[in-house]
Image: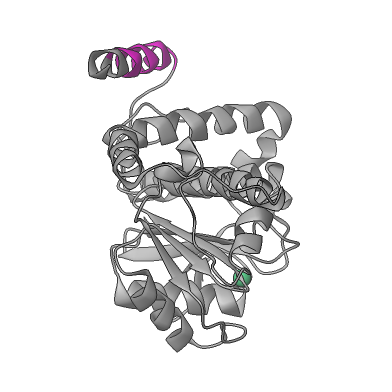
Amino acid sequence: MRGLRHLMKNCIHQSQRSSIIQTVRFFTSDSAKPYSLPNNAWGRNRACRLELACAYRGLDKLELNEGVCNHLTAMAPAADGQGEVMLVFPYGQHWSEVQASSILGVDSNGSTVEGEGRPETTAACIHLGIRKVNPDAKIIMHTHQPWATAMGCLEDPSMKMVHQNSTRFFQRVAYDTSYSGLANAIEEGERLGHLLGDKDMLVMGNHGVLAVAKTIAMAFDHLYFFERAAQVQMLAMSTGEKVRLISKEQSESGCKTFWEDLQMYADVHFYSMYRRLRNISPDFEL
Ligand SMILES: [Zn+2]
């Protein structure tokens, strides 16, 4: 089985390498990319913008966003080579309109240092606050995606091991059951950061969800599969029938198996969306 996975991985990479150049950057894995850029500060900043724009557009296609709210951020090298910036879309733009060049770079105070506009207040407060607690949270994605958000509105908001996809998140989810209104202060982001701890997902009760990862592809993949797992759970529960759960041992084993190659799975998924967007709305790369 393991041999087959590695064979698949090599085949995928070799087929992609014929037309694209491999680049290595810290917000992404070392897999082959559908873009080619110089490996300097500007190029790394630009690559992060391309991937983040793809995530905004892709999650919009999957209908996991809400109006012009919700926010995805990534830490990137500043385009001028002076430290890091937090990349985030400007307040008021719809996710379907986001372009690599319209994304803002903001400093640790939330002030815009790259681009025109300003981030939404809650975006700055949640994301900057979490990173004050956990500087390694390079990629943070927050949505009000419907099935996972509905699950978080239940008295018991926990993800149950009802499906293969659920096991990927076994013991990797934190829960906030103390909804405290709109996040208009950085302290609220810090509170969420402490609750999140070393988990990958935070279910924000009566509000939404949040994914944290080291790469944009992984955070995108987390949100997609968390939504699918929540959907199956809610549908199964809504029948009123007793739900058959996967055992703790099998859930633990399934989770371990997923995570052995999860970055590869996430990359294959995310860059398929990148190619899809290039066909149907290529202006995201502008
Ligand atoms: Zn929200």
Number of marks in the rendered image: 0
Position of 57 relative to 157 (above/below): above
Residue 241 inside the magenta-drawn segment? no
Query: Image point 37% across, 69% down: which residue?
Result: 196
At which x and y percent is residue 199?
A: 34, 61
Query: Image point 68% across, 66% down: which residue?
Result: 69
- Of the 4 image quadrants, the one containing the C terminus is top right
* Left or right, 133 with reference to 149: left
At which x and y percent is residue 235?
A: 68, 47
- In the rendered structure, which segment of residues is drawn in magenta? 7-19
Could you tell me if residue 47 is visible in this image? Answer: no
Query: Image point 34% across, 62% down: which residue?
Result: 137
278 vs 213, nearest the viewer: 213
Query: Image point 57% across, 58% down: which residue?
Result: 103
Residue 15 inside the magenta-drawn segment? yes
At which x and y percent is residue 155?
A: 58, 72
